[in-house]
Amino acid sequence: MAITNESSNVLGVISLVFGILSLLVMALILGPISIILGAIAGSNGNTMGWWGMALGVIGVVAGVVVLSSIG
């Protein structure tokens, strides 16, 4: 199934939203979702996908740091 430009834009926006949310809540769940969707959207030329992927990585790293400092 080919991803159209419109589908790539939707995936980019969802990735960006999940990336932002991963900085605030459920980083270890929303971060990887953001990374995967961002990679798919970014590979189709969507800039928001790359930003979402970057925020997902930052969210996962921050989540791991917070969890390791608690335990």
Image (cartoon, rainbow, N blue to C red):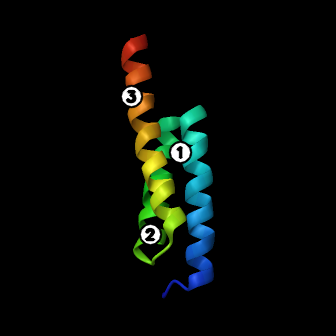
The x and y percentages for residue 56 are 46, 47
Task: Write the residue at 38% across / 34% down.
Answer: 61
Q: Are marks 1 and 2 in contact (CB under 8 Å)?
A: no
Q: Residues within 10 Å of mark 3 (few under 14, many from 20)?
A: some
Q: Answer left or right for 65 relative to 4.
A: left
Q: Point out which mark residue 64 bears.
A: 3
Q: Residues within 10 Å of mark 1 (few under 14, many from 20)?
A: many
Label 1 element class: helix
Q: What separation in Å lies between label 1 and label 2 (alpha carbons)?
A: 17 Å
Quadrant (top left, top right, bottom left, bottom right) of the C terminus? top left
Q: Answer left or right for 7 relative to 61.
A: right
Task: Write the residue at 60% across / 73% down.
Answer: 9
Q: Point out which mark residue 30 bears.
A: 1
Q: Earlier in the sequence, mark 3 or mark 2?
A: 2
Q: Mark 3 is on which residue type?
A: Val
The x and y percentages for residue 64 are 39, 28
Q: Mark 2 is on which residue type?
A: Gly
Identify the residue position indicated by label 2 in the image: 42
Q: Is residue 30 above or below residue 42?
A: above
